[in-house]
Image (cartoon, rainbow, N blue to C red):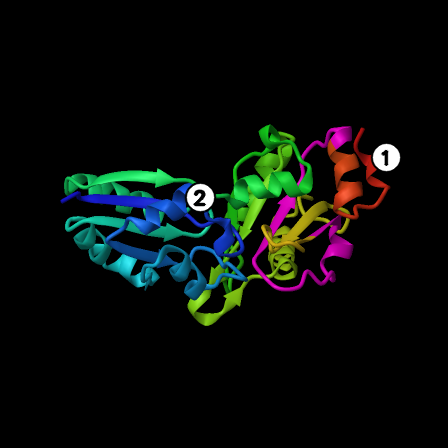
Amino acid sequence: MMKELVFVGLGLNDEYGITLKGLEELKTADTIFMETYTSRMPDFNMQHLEELCNKKIQLITRQTLEEENGQQILQAAELGKTIFLVPGDPFIATTHVTLRIDAKKRGVATRIVHGISIMSAIVSLSGLHNYKFGKTVTIPFSETPAETPYNVLTQNKKLGLHTLCLLDLREPENRYLTINQAIQTLQIVEQQKQQNTITPDTVAIGIARAGNNKPALKAGFLKNLINFDFGMPPYSLIFPGDLHFMEVDALIAFADAPVELKRLFK
């Protein structure tokens, strides 16, 4: 009997995002779990994936993983080969690192089958250079806008680095922080801090439904983006730092950025 926990990335949009290697792992699993709370996969079809691997898949909630320390998954892994399916790449969500550590403490072997992540997809979609990204930050739902995203953005901006902002989601409530709401949150903090990090003429890039055949990608000034309709979630927001002329050309070509960017970044 093999005690094993395999973390398999699902990719970004639907069940077709899983790799062939990941699908083969599913076919030989004793138990399969999946979480949907760290990211939304708009076109995912559970029944179809179950048909592809000829296995039943059990959905896991945030409570099971965080409040119950993933006991259900760990107990299954102690009895046989267990798969844990995660949207994107398995360890972009830090909660899953804890689960892997706990598995090792129990003497359960672990492996990873990587999937396409938003961290790489936004680079491919936007045309920005990967090595120029600074610290990534999440903009949360909050009655009182958090200062951390603003502070991270300010720090990256001083260093000339791009900032990826992941936007909060509450999957059980079907709530997703929109790009427009995220901009408004940062504007409120700007009014308090007044460091000119967020102004009407600040350049940003909004991305929706990365991994979909028709993702939304729009670059421009915040005064224009705040009223732009990005359609359905999930959403991401990028604030570019110092742009190379090739990055500017890519934003104009693929993100409908205003030609005026050519004069601002040389």
For the residue pair 52 and 206, the one nearer the viewer reads as 52
* First in sequence: mark 2 vs mark 1: 2
The circle on residue 123 is: none
Q: Amino acid at mark 1?
A: Arg
For the residue pair 51 and 127, the one nearer the viewer reads as 51
Up/down of 184 relative to 119, above or below = below
Q: How many marks?
A: 2
- Measured as percent of width and height from the top left, residue 121 is found at 58, 43
Q: Secondary structure at mark 2?
A: helix
Report if the CB atoms under discs 2 and 1 are less than 8 Å apart: no
Q: Which quadrant holds residue 163? A: top right
Magenta stretch in the rendered image:
217-246
For the residue pair 72 and 25, the one nearer the viewer reads as 25
- Measured as percent of width and height from the top left, residue 176 is found at 54, 63
- The residue sitting at 15% across, 51% down in the picture is 79
Q: CA distance from mark 2 to mark 1?
A: 45 Å
Q: Is residue 51 left or right of residue 29?
A: right
- Measured as percent of width and height from the top left, residue 66 is found at 29, 56
Tell me, yes or no, if residue 53 can be seen here.
yes
Tell me, yes or no, if residue 69 can be seen here.
no
Mark 2, Cα crowd under 10 Å, few <14 / some 14-19 / many 20+, is few
- The residue sitting at 37% across, 45% down in the picture is 24
User: Which residue appears farthest toward the bottom when viewing the image?
Assistant: 173
Residue hosting label 1? 263
Q: Is residue 75 left or right of residue 163?
A: left
Residue hosting label 2? 20
Mark 1, Cα crowd under 10 Å, few <14 / some 14-19 / many 20+, is few
The answer to if 102 sits in the magenta stretch is no
The answer to if 218 sits in the magenta stretch is yes
- The residue sitting at 83% across, 46% down in the picture is 258
